[in-house]
Image (cartoon, grey):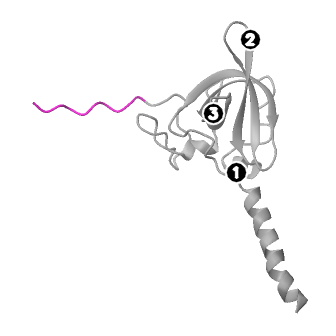
Amino acid sequence: MRMKRMLPCAAAVLFVGAAAAHHSTAEFDYTKQVTIKGVVKEVQWTNPHSYIQLLVDGDAAEKVQWSVEIGSPSLNVNMGWRKNSVKTGDMVTLNLSPARNGKPYGTLRVLTFADGRTLEGVAARVGAGPGGPPPAGPGGPRPASPATPPPSPAKEP
């Protein structure tokens, strides 16, 4: 009898733990895109999310450190990444969806190396809103630069 009373409590504890372990991506503004260029300070290949720390020229002579989420290691590997795909010291251009709070933080859409090679981030498959590039299709990576906005509709006389 005591076991029957404890079972719902145990199930609730497990459910709450699982729910707390997952978080939303609402912190990012997928209707906007920012392109930054800089030197990789560090790559953090960790679960549940990996990050690139990028040093970008700011106002005056200061460097601004951006923290860019690139997805979990398993997702990254499935998208063609390897643990050593990006290294400290690499000069890269990142197209990302920025944090809604305006801090130098975002989620990666496309990383472009100096030689033109690209790697997609998980956000590459999320729409960018009006005027932004379409989500990447199954055909492979798309260019890192934003697409040209569609032409304005013709006005009728």
Residue 74 part of the magenta-drawn span: no
| Distance from Cα at disc 2 to Cα at disc 3 | 21 Å
Dot label at residue 92: none
Where's residue 70, x and y in %? 70, 40
Residue behind mark 2: 62
- The outermost residue toward the left is 157
The answer for how far apart the CA atoms under marks 1 and 3 are is 26 Å
User: Which one is in front, 94 or 143?
Assistant: 94
Task: Name which residue lies at 54% across and 45% down.
Answer: 126
Q: Which residues are magenta?
A: 148-157
Q: Which mark is residue 75?
A: 1
Where does the N terminus fall, quadrant-wise?
bottom right
Assign the magenta stretch its main secondary structure.
Answer: loop
Residue at the location (58% across, 26% down)?
35
- The label number, if any, that marks residue 101 in the structure image: 3
- From the image, state whether disc 1 or disc 3 is nearer to you: 3
- The type of residue carrying mark 3 is Asn
**Residue flagged by tag 1: what amino acid is it?**
Leu
Q: Position of residue 5 (x, y in %)?
A: 84, 85
Are the residues tagged 1 and 2 within 8 Å (C-beta)?
Answer: no
Left or right, 120 with reference to 134: right
Q: Residue furthest bottom?
A: 1
